[in-house]
Amino acid sequence: MHTYQKLLLTNKAWAAQKLRVDPNYFNELSKDQTPDYLWIGCSDSRVPADQVTGTQPGEIFVHRNVANLVLHTDMNLLSVLQYAVEVLKVKHILVVGHYNCGGVKAAMSNEDFGLINKWLRNIKDIYEKHEDELNGISDETLRFNRLVELNVIEQVKNLAKTTIVQKAWANGEYPYLHGWVFDLHTGLINQIIEVESGDLNTINPIHRFNIPDKKTADLENLMKD
């Protein structure tokens, strides 16, 4: 038996078990999803969003990429973000990195990794931005861990820079933004940064768009009529 076939057998056992517990489980699951959370995590196979948070299918909307980056040029990420914020109306966006992240570790080196160099460049830029702090950490593991945390902080700030998030805030809506790091050695999540809904103070004013709040927009439309 090929290893992939075990996945199919496990799937059948899982589906049968769910039906034994609740014959209507999949009827309910097939209805519209209403998750409260968007998880932007690393592609690392050791950090499954549902298992480390104890969430069930339908409770958490997931996007994953190498080193959990939020880039303004990544149409995949931005499409997920727009759908999550504007359609699903998620209340919380979680940027979740993890210690011992291979992407972050690769970015700390001067090795040529080929195509992924262009992706890792974003993490190298974060290192350069915080170079004084990082180079002041003599222990290599602690420096590595701190860059993982700084990467998460920068990605949360990148979320706040998007018009998708700022428009939602201008309308008095969610989401709250959270930066977490999962510790592979303990199984615990460390909270690194939290941004309240509507709080633009986490980013430089140059990144704050002139988006009228809902009351102002409604008034302007009324005056046009």
Image (cartoon, helix red, strand yellow):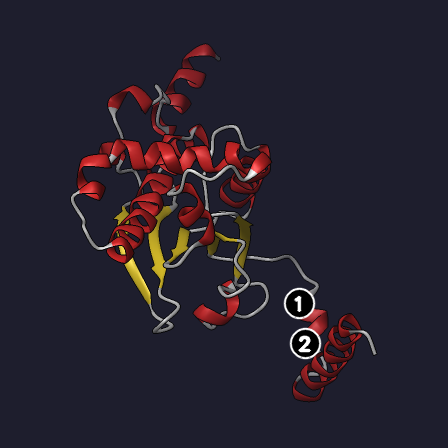
User: Which residue is denoted by mark 2 in the rendering?
Assistant: 25
Amino acid carrying label 2: it is Tyr
Q: Tell how many labels.
A: 2
Res 113 quadrant in image: top right
Q: Hey, which residue is sitting farthest front in the picture?
A: 111
Residue 83 pos. (x, y %): 57, 41
Tag on residue 69? none
User: Which residue is denoted by mark 1 in the rendering?
Assistant: 29
Residue placed at 40% from the left, 54% from the top?
Answer: 97
Residue 208 pos. (x, y %): 31, 24
Q: Residues within 10 Å of mark 2 (few under 14, many from 20)?
A: few
Amino acid carrying label 1: it is Leu
Residue placed at 36% from the left, 72% from the top?
Answer: 185
Residue nearer the viewer, 38 or 174: 38
CB of mark 1 within 8 Å of CB of mark 2? yes
Q: Hey, which residue is sitting farthest left in the picture?
A: 136
